[in-house]
Amino acid sequence: MTSNSSSLPPPQPLGYQSAAPEKRRPIIDLPLAIICGFAASLISVMLLLVVPYVWAMQAPTLMDFGVRIPDATRSLLAFSRFCQSGGIVLIWILFAIPPIVAARVQPWPPPPIARQRVFRPARIIITLMVGLFCVWIVLGLMLPHTVLLDAISAGTKKQN
């Protein structure tokens, strides 16, 4: 029996310790999704609540003086009405696309250094979109005041 047991190969370790399983590519870029959700919420509040409220306060005065409404204000009001009639879903869809696309175009697997800053064009584009949209809203709501001040200073109040 001794000779038989010496001819057996030495026992091999079992493969309990294998390499870590490869992480799967995420479906969405979660930090970008949070940013986009915040941006879509901000724009929704501005279009559905702020713009109609401010315009309801301004409209009687502008109509009383008979001033022409600036084009930026007209386009903002038209877009706000579109969003109130269900178009806000389009805004949310547009802000849902970048986190999905960004997750697909990011290099995979991620670099080994987790704290490394990486240039993310999607975040810059979202920031610029929200910034430009906010500028459009501010201009659309404030330009009528400038036109009204010009009308008052020129003394061109509409005669009834």
Image (tube, rainbow, N blue to C red):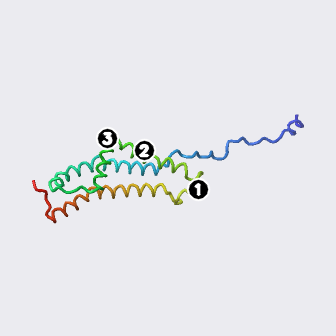
Ranked by sequence position, the earlier of labels 2 and 3 is: 3
Residue at 25% from the left image edge and 48% from the top image edge: 52
**Kind of residue at disc 3:** Ser
> Which of the image's four quarters has the N terminus?
top right
Amino acid type for the residue under numbered disc 2: Ile
The kind of residue on which mark 1 rests is Pro
Give percent across and percent down for residue 41: 36, 48
Marks 1 and 3, how far apart at CA:
45 Å
Instruction: Give the label, 1 or 3, closer to the camera.
Output: 3
On the image, numbered disc 1 is attached to which residue?
111
Residue at horizontal 19%, vertical 64%?
150
The local crowd at label 3, few if under 14, some if 14 to 19, many if 20 or more residues have their Cα within 10 Å, is few
Q: Tell me which label, 1 or 3, sits earlier in the chain.
A: 3
Residue at horizontal 38 percent and vertical 48 percent from the top? 40
The local crowd at label 2, few if under 14, some if 14 to 19, many if 20 or more residues have their Cα within 10 Å, is few
Which residue occupies the extreme right position in the image? Answer: 3
Local crowd size for mark 1, using a 10 Å CA cut-off: few (<14), some (14–19), many (≥20): few
Q: Is residue 151 left or right of residue 71?
A: left
Residue picked out by circle 3: 85
Q: CA distance from mark 2 to mark 1?
A: 30 Å
> Considering only vertical position in the picture, is 153 above or below 48?
below
Left or right of residue 112: residue 2: right
Q: Which mark is residue 93?
A: 2
Which residue is at 49% across, 49% downward? Answer: 29
The secondary element bearing badge 2 is classed as helix
Q: Please tell me which of labels 2 and 1 falls first in the chain.
A: 2
Where residue 35 appears, as percent x and y from the top left, is 42, 51
Q: Which corner quadrant of the image does residue 112 belong to?
A: bottom right
